[in-house]
Image: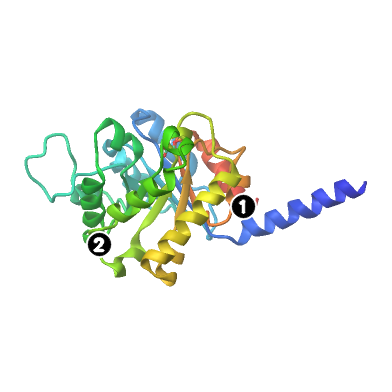
Amino acid sequence: MNDKDIEQIVRDEIIKSILQTQEFLVVGNWKMNKTKHEVIAFLDAVANYDFGEKNTVVIAPPSPYLYLFEDRLRYSKILYGVQNFYPKENGSFTGEISFEMARDFGAKYAIIGHSERRMIFSECNAFVSKKVRSCIQNQILPILCIGENIDQRKSNDYKNFISEQITEGLSLISESDLNNVIIAYEPIWAIGTGETATPDQVEETHIFIRKFLMDKYGAQIGKDIPLLYGGSVNAANVKSLALAQSVSGFLIGGASLSAQTFIEINDILNGK
Ligand code: PGA
């Protein structure tokens, strides 16, 4: 064994021990995917898996399958949430579901302001902020998604853009509620494209967001808001992304659809 091999072994052991101690929030965003049979097969594969104590594991399935999650994850460590809801208790809102319906089936989280909702369904910051407020008022943890498109990234204006998404997205809740908020940084150019942001890009942006949160809401509150990264995360890149500073976890689309890959990613984030 030469010096390089020894160096590598030592480095691997250090990384392992970091991953074994750091707490992560791992959220699977299934988007509009899977049939009932596929959902059942996935849940059967993960329901009794040992995800350990350290990390929080969440899946956001399409809402019609929430009843399967409630039924099959009763004794599991996996929590679940919704990908969207309308910020009213009930009423004439054809095609929408309410937070109460989500809660009825045990949903604990809601993905809010995902770029696909902003782009395809024209959701603006003002509407997103109402959803965040509605989550807080109804004991659902909002995962507020922010992120720039490729032109904004290239023009170097993206930091202003994401700061505004944060400021406006959180504008209707009080400071004391900020400890129930999760932020997911998802650069649009990296979502579903296979083009992940590099660990350096993620670290740079997360450090910027962390500093922004601490300046705006105070050091203590700003330091504690979990900051997820999302955009083409998979089993091959999650380890290096997890080591980037200020990354508290991941929002994972495509790679969360396979039970085997989802387990593999979680194993990596447990330092296994
Ligand atoms: P992706 O999606 O992992 O497939 O890029 C992430 C997301 O949109 O939340």
Write down the residue under mark 2. 173
Q: First in sequence, mark 1 or 2: give its number.
A: 2
Q: What residue type is labelled 2?
A: Ile
Quadrant of residue 94 in the image?
Answer: top left
* Mark 2: secondary structure: loop
* Mark 1: secondary structure: loop
Q: In this view, does 60 lie above or below 248?
A: above
Q: In the rendering, at what x and y percent does residue 164 appear?
A: 33, 50
Horizontal side, residue 272 vs residue 230: left or right:
right
Q: In the rendering, at what x and y percent does residue 234 appear?
A: 55, 37
For residue 59, say whether it is visible. yes
Horizontal side, residue 128 vs residue 209: left or right:
left
Q: Which amino acid does label 1 sit on?
A: Leu
Q: In the rendering, at what x and y percent does residue 8 appear?
A: 80, 48
Q: Which residue is drawn at 87% across and 47% down?
A: 4
How many labels sit on residues? 2
Q: Which quarter of the frame holds ligand 1?
A: top left
Report, in whole angstroms, how far the alpha carbon at label 1 lies from the one at label 2. Answer: 31 Å
Q: Which residue is drawn at 56% across and 44% down?
A: 201
| Residue sitting at the far left | 92
| Mark sitting on residue 243 | 1
Q: In the rendering, at what x and y percent does residue 122 appear?
A: 24, 35
